[in-house]
Amino acid sequence: MAPADELRNDPAAIDVTRPDTPKGWVSRLLKGMAVGVGAILPGLSGGVLAVIFKLYDPMIRFLANLRRNFVKNVLFFTPVGIGMMLGIVGFSVVVEAAFGRYAAQFTCLFIGFVIGTFPSLYRQAGKRGRSTKDLVIMGLAALAIFALMYIGGDSQLLQVEPSVPVWFGSGALIGLGVIVPGMSPSNFLIYFGLYDKMATGIKNFDMGTIIPLALGLIVCVMLLAKAAAWAFDRYYSGMYHFILGMVIGSSVAIFPTVVFPAFAPAGLAASGLSLGGSIAFAAALLVVGVVASYLFSKVEDRYSDQREAIEAAGKDN
């Protein structure tokens, strides 16, 4: 069944043609802010949050056919877009403060987000069945990404310097994280040393950073949203396990390439912490990230179960 057909048969789907209300507008603004934070928060995914808030389905339907209900769709997604911008800018202030002396420790917080949400994402990946082939795809994807990041840890080729093309590509990665639920491209931005620079540029309203980021995000969403919907519709399990493999591999590789060097003498001198204090701080933030994201994923699972119950009831009727 095509994605658009699934939406038409989904009793829980949002109808953008319904009359809007001030409460609905504010609600979509707040949801957009959450999606914006998820788009740049390592370990989380703007796409996952869009699914939770029931924004993903109407977005895919809109992008699959831009001419259908164009004005009503634009009006519907305007507060979402404003909210996303506010979420990204607001969270960038937090990121700039965090990625100072204690970059490795706060990276552990973000990796905790990955660990905590993985059980939920793994469950989501198997909703249409899970075969040995899917597990092999996940394992190979994880190994490939880990090898790329670990082997290139000291390579100057992977020490990317900010530029307009680089920020355009970074924006495209963020856009991919919005349209592909479960993918957190910020892990890659951390590894390439771009994440804190991106946050600083956004916070300072540096147009040399913001404009190519925005263009990359828009181009990626416009070009790949329909393809992503098609791929997930036909190869759901394989796609999800491939994405999970990338998340696992990139997250694990961050430890030897980003976190562990902070425990070396040079890293300790930069942070002003002792070895024991540095490790304890990192471990504490890791635990906080795991617990927070696990609790969040439980809420997500409850929402998903409720939505499936509504769909089942609609089919019975």
Image (cartoon, rainbow, N blue to C red):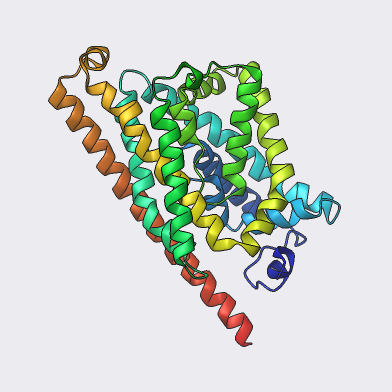
Residue furthest bottom as drawn: 317
| Foreground pick, 81 / 116 | 116
Q: Is residue 28 above or below residue 162?
A: below
Looking at the image, can residue 31 be seen? yes
Residue 214 coordinates in the image, percent (x, y): 66, 30
What's the residue at 37%, 35% (across, down)? 253
What's the residue at 59%, 36% (across, down)? 173
Which quadrant: the N terminus?
A: bottom right
Q: Is residue 39 left or right of residue 187?
A: right
Counting the numbered discs, the total is 0
| Foreground pick, 159 / 48 | 159
Residue 245 coordinates in the image, percent (x, y): 45, 49
What's the residue at 31%, 33% (across, down)? 255
Which quadrant: the C terminus?
A: bottom right
Which quadrant of the view contains residue 235?
A: bottom right
Residue furthest right as drawn: 67
Residue 210 coordinates in the image, percent (x, y): 63, 23
Q: Is residue 285 left or right of residue 17?
A: left
Q: Is residue 137 above or below residue 130?
A: above
Which quadrant of the view contains residue 2?
A: bottom right
Q: Is residue 158 above or below residue 141?
A: above
Looking at the image, can residue 20 be seen? no
Q: Is residue 287 above or below residue 156?
A: below
Residue 11 coordinates in the image, percent (x, y): 65, 73
What's the residue at 65%, 19% (across, down)? 164
